Amino acid sequence: MEGCAIADEAGQVIQITAKRYEYNPGTITVKKKGVPVVLEFTSLDRLHGFNCPGLGIRTDIAPGKAATLLLVPQKAGTFPFHCDNFCGSGHEDMTGTIVVTE
Ligand code: CUA
């Protein structure tokens, strides 16, 4: 993330890959409420999406291009996310969880 301004202000970069029909890791643990982290997504095959309504963040994940989101969690808890670009027969099962600790 050299030269990336949002990475400079965040303490941690979490790398997540997306492919039919899973995210790796499927459970993303964010250390602490209020501490900014960068989520960096890479697709291994085709266009996917990342949408976490409970935290108000989403992005497209296109192959060949990293997608980054800055997350500053305001509340602790467990927040489901899902793919929101139709990607095939397993699209509805392409889900995961963000865990924000106190
Ligand atoms: Cu991946 Cu829909």
Image (cartoon, helix red, strand yellow):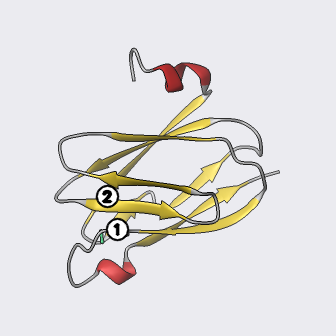
**Residue 20 sits above or below residue 73 on the image:** below
Q: Is 31 positioned to the left or the right of 40 in the image?
A: right
Q: Nearer the viewer, residue 38 or 26?
A: 38
Ligand 1 is found in which quarter of the picture?
bottom left
Q: What secondary structure is marked by label 2?
A: strand
Q: Which residue is mark 2?
A: 18
At x 16%, y 58%, the residue is 45
Assess whether mark 2 and mark 1 are in contact (beta carbons under 8 angstroms).
Answer: yes
Mark number for residue 48? none
Query: What kind of residue is marked 2?
Result: Ala
Q: Is residue 74 left or right of residue 41?
A: right
Above or below for 98 versus 67: below
The kind of secondary structure element at disc 1 is: strand
Asked if the residue at label 2 sits under 8 Å from ligand 1, the reply is: yes
Q: CA distance from mark 1 to mark 2?
A: 6 Å
Q: Position of residue 10 (x, y in %)?
A: 60, 27
According to the picture, the residue beneath numbered tag 1 turns out to be 22
Residue 41 screen position, x and y as percent: 37, 46
Amino acid type of the residue that numbered disc 1 sits on in the rendered structure: Glu
The crowd level at tag 2 (other Cα within 10 Å; few <14, some 14-19, many 20+) is: many
Q: Tell how many labels.
A: 2
